[in-house]
Image: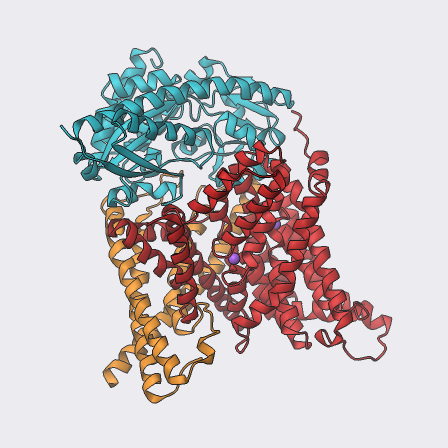
Amino acid sequence: MNSSLVLVLMFAGLLLLLLSGMPLAFVLSALAVVFTVLLWGTDALVLTVLQTFDAMTSDILLAIPLYVLMASVLQRSGIIEALYRAMELWFRRLPGGLAVGTVVICTIMAAMTGIVGAAVAAMGILALPSMLRRGYDQRLALGTICAGGTLGILIPPSIITIVYAATAQISVGKMFAAGIVPGLVLAGLYMAYIVIRVMLQPEKAPRQEARAIGWRERLGSLTSLILPSLIVLAVLGSIYAGIATPTEAAAVGVIGALVSAACQRELTVGNLKAAAMDTLRVTTMIMWITIGAKIFVSIFTGTGGADSLLQFIQDLEVNRWLVLLAMMLVLVFLGLFLDEIGIILLCVPVFLPIIHAFHFDPLWFGVLFLITAQMAYITPPFGYTLFYIKGVLPDGIGMDTVYRAIVPFLVLQLLALALFVLFPDLVTWLPERIVQPSQP
Amino acid sequence: MPVVLGYCRLVTAFNRWLAGAVSALAFVMVAVIGYEVVARYFFDAPTVWAMELSTLLFGPYFLLAGPYLLHTAGHVNVDILHARLPRRAAGWLDCLCHVLIALLAAVFIVQSLPVALNAFDSGETSFTAWNPPIWPVKALIPVAFLLLLLQAVAEAILAARRALAGEGSA
Amino acid sequence: EELPSVNWRMQALWDAGTTPYEYEKHFVQRVAELTNGKFQIRLFAGGQLAPSAQAFEAVRAGAFQMMKTFDGYEAGAIPAFAFTSTVPFGFPEPDQYEAWFYEKGGLDMAREAYAKAGLFYIAPTVYGQEPIHSKFPLRSLADLKGKKGRFVGLASTVMAAFGVATTGLPTAEVYQALEKGVIDFADRGDLTANLEAGLGEVAGYVVVPGFHQPTTATSYVANRAAYDSLPASYKAALEVAAREISASLRQHILAQDAVALKQFEAQGVKVIHLNPDMVAEGRATAMGAWRKAAGDDELANRVLDSQIAFMKELGLLD
Ligand code: NA
Ligand code: NA
């Protein structure tokens, strides 16, 4: 079977099976099983089990249950509701204030972890109920969390950045530094969009009671900031002071959340059990999808599904900017249905020689690459983030709502991509200044 | 019919109990990692086992909960077409999907058994400084997929019953 | 006589684009050349089909016909593999290690170990040391005491014997763990790979030779049934190409190491060249850990005894 045929059939198969309503986790592995048997025979089916075992022993993905548990404990103990109440009092005059506040929390979360599943599920549990309860538009709330949840890819620490750096043979530190400004720019774009959108359509984010709110009440609400801030401090502090690795810091966050819940006298057996079940449900959903995705990616790349596309790029003999554009398009297209690790393994070794040949900066290209990886997470129909968020949604909100919610944020990402292509200094300025060789 | 429904209830009850049991592992992982951080940073005495133990707990944690998640429709799907189908048709489609999942589970069982047996026969350990046996984790794969198969069959039966009764699930 | 066309799949040990991966490309090209293009091996990157540490089971089941692997991945199942991959404080020169394989029966013992799993060990690729990256000046074994280090496999046990508190962080976390001071020193990859990963930015010292991994052997391994069905000349082609790659990759790394060390120095990193006597001194202590790793496994003990005997002949052990 030739490469283009594999590509078309696997893509069409995904669409068709997904429409049947079969869960994504099983759609991915079922397709992989069918294609494995067709192309390589039954001997190769053992790959499904080996990928499963690999996901089961991932010391990196271990961060997912930890961050989800932290979020769930905070949510169940009412700490987050108090935080949103405070934001409400303080950001009353800011259109879409709670969504803007959510982007800020996402950015902080991004500085804690680079595991998108962890960030998105945690933010879904934390932020979504509080926004929906106040009559925020479902799509605005969902889009904010999905897009904000992927900021962790650009903002260090980030495993995807490390994988890119290793594959592209660039310093991890430089790649990390390169992601900071673009990550903040993206967060800024999201916030600007929310404010403008709500100014134009105030019904998307209703303001609370018009009564005058005294300073006493406002200042009083600030106490609700204390516990969440201490947790943020504990997690970020333990990462940046060298006390814990990013994965371990997630456990520090859970302990902080438990202590906070105890301070609120909400550390009850009922709350703990409920938080444990929330965490199990969300983690299991994400990890079974991860297993399916790993199997699917290994078969898709192994059977040469992307070969014809990559060959096309290699054979292009046109202007360097057109080549760059073509590479971006291929990345965005593959991002429609592959996960970012799969894309890195496939594309980076093919693209890097081209990048060097055309004298593009691999560091700068890396950031463009990471933004397209971020887009891969939120592009319908197979943006993994969209599935993760649906897993924490209240009943009655369907996948189509999620798909529509993300579109404006996708446009913003495209805008950002164009911005960094036109102004490469936004990317390269910081790494050139802060990464110095260490002196013994 | 009562026998069939009894089967569905039994399988679901067991998988529900199992999910409840493994849910507590999240707190165990937190405690183990928390211990490691304190031991390493404050006492300069990192353990050889903590990170590995929590990693070894992680797999069973989410793998064994998968079957019960099937019952609660917790595995995310795309509901766009499904929500627009007549109830009877949706019920039959559900039934078909669960049959497919059962077949898929069977493939995993057949493929994972030899891998688990090889690991057991050689008494496979992780070859780290702690060096715990690793075969139990591998052996859990066929177990989890057997439970998935049983649950998928139960769900297929329940979906067929809904379809026959003319009421679909959402 | 007309020889058949054979198509195999092989998974490499390393990511596409890395130097060792390029040498696997040479390998499959060489096999094709030696068989008039009749024996084609399609190469996949490390982890592309099966996770690298699981490739063993994949080849065993026939998902692909051969792999490049690191025996240490399976040392928990087959103890002899602890010594056919890399031995902390073991042979200091790759030529010595390769000589053990080809002159002292090592190849046959490696084949025996793999045969138990239905696999055929074709040949090793042997190369030199991997460095240690350190935040403190490591000049003697006494400096190790009380330090926190990242080591994996047998090396973690051996380092513990010198008073190191070892942790087995994932490769991806080494840079950050050094940067933030979670650990004091670490092993990761070869000098060039570590230079490119920017370890010079986070650790002020490069210590060579890395006594935790003075020499390394990676292995070409095939599915037994697939191998047995090959014509004799194809089998020979695999062995010839494998031995060629072993020499050419080793020489490439040797040359690159010198360049990488210069670049580390240009970054302001201090390079510490350890005295061979110091490494030799540690060898006796490490031997205790070797014995422990061999346990009561018959083959592992035979492998270890043969290596120790050769080390004595070479004057590396008393
Ligand atoms: Na991050
Ligand atoms: Na996508």
* C2 on left or right of A291: left
* B34 on left or right of C53: right
Residue C293 position (above or below residue C247) = below
Q: Which residue is at a point 39% across and 63% down the rendered structure image?
A: A27
**Residue A264 x %, y %:** 65, 68
Q: Quadrant of residue B92?
A: bottom left
Chain A as rendered: colour: red
Residue C30 position (above or below residue A23) = above
**Residue B40 x %, y %:** 54, 42
Does the rendering let one see residue C270? no
Counting the numbered discs, the total is: 0
Does the rendering let one see residue C119? yes
Q: Which quadrant is the N terminus of chain B positioned in?
A: bottom left
Chain B as rendered: colour: orange
**Residue B25 x %, y %:** 44, 60
Q: Which residue is at a point 34% across and 28% down the rendered structure image?
A: C29
Of residues A208 and C169, which is closer to you in this image? A208
Of residues B148 and A145, which is closer to you in this image? A145
Residue projecting furthest to the front: A318
**Residue C115 x %, y %:** 20, 35
Of residues A41 and A121, which is closer to you in this image? A41
Residue projecting furthest to the left: C1
- Chain letter, colour cyan: C
* A332 on left or right of A19: right
* B55 on left or right of C194: left
Residue A338 position (above or below residue A16) = above
Q: Which residue is at a point 44% across and 18% down the rendered structure image?
A: C279
Q: Quadrant of residue A99?
A: bottom right
